[in-house]
Image (spheres, coloured by chain):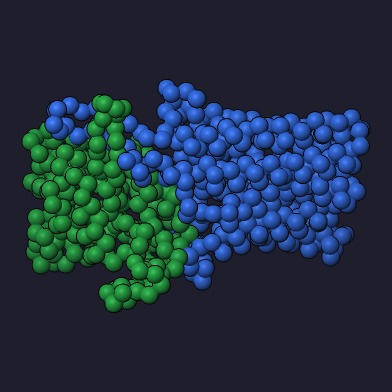
Chain colours: A blue, B green
Amino acid sequence: MNKGTVPKLQRSWDLRAACNFIGGGTGTGLLVFAAISAVIGAPFAAAGLLALVFVGFGLSMVWLEIGKPLRAINVFFHPQTSWMTREGIVALPLFALAALAVLIALARPDLDVAAALTMEAAAAVGLGFLYCQARILRAAKGIRAWSEPAILPLIVASGFAEGAGVYLVLAGLTGAQPLWTYALALLLCGARYGAWWHYRRQLAANGAPAGTLNVLNEAEPLVAWAGHAAPAVLLVLALAGVLPDVLAVLAGLAMAVSGWFVKVTIVLRAARSNGFAVAHTPVRGRGTSRAGERHGWQLPHQGG
Amino acid sequence: MTRYVMVADLRRCIGCQTCTAACKLTNATMPGVQWRRVVDMEVGTFPDVQRVFMPVGCQHCSDPPCMEVCPSTATGKRADGIVTIDYELCIGCSYCAVACPYEARYKVDKPTFAFGDTPTEVEARRYDPAMIGVAQKCTFCADTVDDGVSRGLTPGVDPDATPACVNSCISGALSFGDIEDPDSNVSKLLRENQHFRMHEEQGTNPGFYYLWDGARP
């Protein structure tokens, strides 16, 4: 008994969907770093190009997941309310602007101001894309771990942090790591942990499937220590001048991978349905009714 | 105005799953797909325990989150409140499935049959390739309702204008009708009995009511 009434793990979206949130977040975060680099006159073409690869990879994964890929154009039909449509629409100028900025930077180095302005515009559109992704999850009322409002700052902060992480790795490989990147990455690392902490706290405070909370609690030590504390320490050391080229790359790797881990955890492992619930049991036999129970849920008063 | 709703009397439902079988037969859904089903739950702790059978499926919400998120406009809502899917528009992204608070939506990616890879004669005859790779769910037997209404019949009263699950219910637990009509069977039931709707906190205004006390069942 109670079979089928407890919140069950969703099987509608798999790793391909998670890859969209990973690619989109990392790509748009990287675009922001590319735009900052462009403003201060640092090279940005590689970061811009890699950002496009990430976003394109994510969208390709979604395309592979849908049941009717040849009808993919229909995704643009509902901008009035669907955040998925809006994400698709925003992706068009994102690709056009970022590709144009990279093209100008590579083909016409003399037009550096135009390239920088175009990359800034691409990054601004990228922020819109990232916001759409966060709202896609927020609108999924069937999955408590996604519909929690605190998912919005988490997805946005994680996108920035993942982008910062990949930028640090990229900068390390190209041998150009200005100090501002360490400082900004440190700030974003802290911001993401704050958003993650807030998200988990809100989920528990407002009630969620016990399975969801358990998965998130199990992930916490890894996310906290390997995903945030370790890169934060590495970045502080890099800022102090201790092996900056090596430590910043390691910190970047940890920041990016931990963000991807968080997304896989939320999209796949913690994504439980609402289950079913009776508000009142039927009055039969003894003539009594009881307030219904919600199997598999940890309600706020039950603590955790 | 008309809004068709379903009413399930939890005092009457015995969990026989006849509605489930009738739905599958009527709509030729594939194995693993249950537009209508009855969940079996145990409430309380031994020895103070109650067993409750709860028919579930698409709740035909008046503010359906599935319709809001659908990127292709495949999910729509008719003037009579029935939430529909246009199988020719749906891209099979499953966004509606994760947006539905009631686990009511399914997607079948490849044909499956009751006895392995080979369909039975009936399965082969009723196989609809348009249903592969797209979202699907309970339709409130909209075709039956429309056909009945066009012939002057009353949904929920005349079997030829009523969803299969309601027609098949052996205990009279399921009722169907127009909630906007104060004289309809469902309006009368809701007036005379205490009822609730599932997950009302989601704000979707579901069109599926559960009776739990009131007039003698």
Q: In the image, is A221 to the left or to the right of A8?
A: right
Q: Residue furthest front?
A: B47
Residue A240 at x, y percent in the picture:
89, 30
Residue A21 visible in the current orientation: yes
Residue B156 quadrant: bottom left
Give the position of the C terminus of chain B as an image quadrant. top left
Q: In the image, is A229 to the left or to the right of A152?
A: right
Residue A105 at x, y percent in the picture:
82, 59
What residue is rendered at 8% in x and 64% in y?
B152
Residue B79 visible in the current orientation: no
Q: Between residues A97 and A200, which one lies in front from this camera angle?
A: A200
What residue is rendered at 47% in x and 46% in y?
A9
Q: In the image, is A207 to the left or to the right of B140?
A: right
Q: In the image, is A237 to the left or to the right of B107?
A: right
How many numbered circles does the render carry? 0
Residue A172 at x, y percent in the picture:
86, 47
Q: Between residues A149 and B136, which one lies in front from this camera angle?
A: B136
Residue B54 at x, y percent in the picture:
25, 43
